[in-house]
Image (spheres, helix red, strand yellow):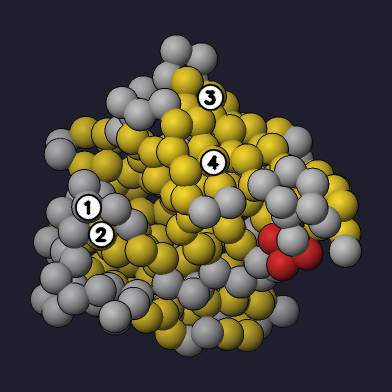
Amino acid sequence: AAGVIQSPRHLIKEKRETATLKCYPIPRHDTVYWYQQGPGQDPQFLISFYEKMQSDKGSIPDRFSAQQFSDYHSELNMSSLELGDSALYFCASSPYRGQGGYTFGSGTRLTVV
Amino acid sequence: SQQGEEDPQALSIQEGENATMNCSYKTSINNLQWYRQNSGRGLVHLILIRSNEREKHSGRLRVTLDTSKKSSSLLITASRAADTASYFCATDSYSGAGSYQLTFGKGTKLSVIP
């Protein structure tokens, strides 16, 4: 069965650079969630999208933005990267705004040096 | 905002023993889920218990939910070295305007010693 696909798996960037993370949800899942997990921390909710519109917003820095496209894939854009942005970034997808359960991708590990 | 708080933060047991992890939360929930994460890897969904359920089993896993105390426990019986991982509870709650959101607790790091 198809799963949630995240790319890239690993990314190394320098401070002040930008990064774009991609998430491809399970087919027919119309809701996407982004989470950030720092070293030794629990996953923190960043933002979610339903039908290409922002649905909920969590602790997402102003330097980050995200969108969901017509094919339901989502991209998380991160600018002016800081060392503290180094983390695992997870994407999850769900049918209809979380009412059908969540499936997580394997994550993108971002290292800012 | 932090929803689930787990204890213990770390647990070390011998292979074959049972491991119990607890989770407390603050708001009303639709369901509560437990996830497993091997070091630096992805989140694996283990089990989901709905707010109207009190106990659920899946293989060696047993989850209880007490909505009056806003708490849940995960019991892993007959632990194996391969169970070594971090375990997170996550509460699924209504966030308004027809949306639900999953909020994670801090996790318990389980070490099973062969």
Return the mark for residue A27: none
Task: Give the x, y percent position of residue B34.
Answer: 51, 47
Query: Is label 3 in a helix, a strand or a loop?
Result: strand
Query: How busy is the neighbourhood of tag 3: few (under 14 within 10 Å), some, or many (20 plus)?
Result: some
Chain ID of residue with mark 2? A
- Amino acid type of the residue tagged 1 in the rendering: Gly
Picture residue at 28% right of the left edge, 46% below the top:
A56
Q: Earlier in the sequence, mark 3 or mark 4?
A: 4
Residue A51 visible to an observer of this rendering: yes
State if disc 2 and disc 1 touch (CB < 8 Å): yes
Circle 4 — which element? Answer: strand
* Quadrant in the rendering for residue A70: bottom left
- In front of the other: label 1 or label 4? 4
Distance CA(mark 1)–CA(mark 3) = 23 Å
Q: Which mark is residue A94?
A: 2
> Of the numbered discs in the image, which one, if any, rests on residue B71?
3
**Which residue carries the number 4 mark?**
B62
Chain letter for the residue marked with disc 1 in the picture: A
In this view, the mark in front (2 or 3): 3
Question: Between residues A13 and A22, which one lies in front from this camera angle?
Answer: A22
In the image, taking residue B64 as reference, residue B10 lies left or right, namely right
